Image: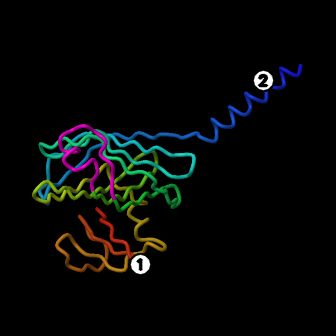
């Protein structure tokens, strides 16, 4: 009987450890619109994985990324925290992303790249704006938009503590609010985000 309770205790401990380390992964497939130095490329099919860790952080992974003729491989952003806004969760990041692949571009960049990310998950769909600065002798500005923005995603930038302090169009001219097309929004908390309406 003592052996039975010891076995039960070991099994319970293993279950609790597994549950504590539990993580979930969401996978999204949609069109990725890419512009290279402000020149639009043809949209491509792309996949993004969002892995939620037990510690409350998430990892954002753009799978098998290619722009123009450059194959990069996976682009990984770790340790981001989601912010709930009704049914939507927003993930923002500005820093360095990892490029773990053995592709020539990833190796040339030292397996890392400066990246700015704004993404929203709502209703089982993901919308993301990704800006990368690629320095390969000459600097290439790569802007990507994954999926389509929902009304909540647009309103999430406008509502609450992230209300716009100023709105500019793509050429830098100040606007009286969000206009159709690309908007550069400087929020009251000092952040700058791109909003496509």
The residue sitting at 45% across, 55% down in the picture is 80
Circle 1 — which element? loop
The segment highlighted magenta reads 96-113
| Quadrant of the frame with the N terminus | top right
**Residue 94 seen in render:** yes
Residue 110 falls within the magenta-colored stretch: yes
Q: Residue 157: where, in percent of width, then height?
A: 40, 67
Q: Residue 152: where, in percent of width, then height?
A: 43, 60
Q: Residue 128: where, in percent of width, then height?
A: 34, 54
**Residue 197 seen in render:** no
Residue count near mark 2 (Cα–Cα under 10 Å), binned few <14, some 14–19, many ≥20: few
Mark 1 = which residue?
A: 188
Residue 116 falls within the magenta-colored stretch: no
The residue sitting at 52% across, 59% down in the picture is 84
Residue closest to the eye, 59 or 1: 1
Q: Is residue 1 above or below residue 117?
A: above
Mark 2 = which residue?
A: 7
Circle 2 — which element? helix
């Amino acid at each position: 009987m003592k052996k039975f309770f010891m076995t039960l205790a070991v099994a319970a401990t293993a279950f609790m450890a597994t549950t504590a380390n539990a993580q979930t992964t969401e996978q999204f497939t949609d069109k990725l619109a890419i512009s290279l130095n402000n020149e639009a490329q043809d949209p491509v099919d792309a996949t993004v994985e969002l892995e939620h860790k037990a510690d409350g952080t998430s990892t954002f992974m753009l799978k098998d990324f290619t722009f123009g003729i450059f194959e990069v491989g996976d682009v990984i952003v770790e340790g981001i925290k989601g912010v709930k806004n009704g049914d939507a969760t927003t993930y923002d990041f500005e820093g360095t992303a990892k490029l773990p692949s053995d592709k020539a571009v990833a190796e040339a960049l030292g397996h890392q790249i400066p990246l700015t990310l704004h993404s929203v998950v709502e209703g089982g769909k993901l919308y993301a704006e990704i800006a990368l600065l690629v320095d390969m002798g000459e600097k290439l500005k790569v802007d990507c938009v994954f999926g389509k923005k929902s009304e909540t995603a647009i309103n999430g930038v406008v509502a609450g503590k992230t209300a716009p302090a100023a709105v500019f169009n793509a050429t830098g001219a100040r606007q009286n609010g969000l206009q159709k097309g690309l908007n550069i929004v400087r929020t009251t908390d000092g952040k700058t985000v791109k909003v496509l309406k």
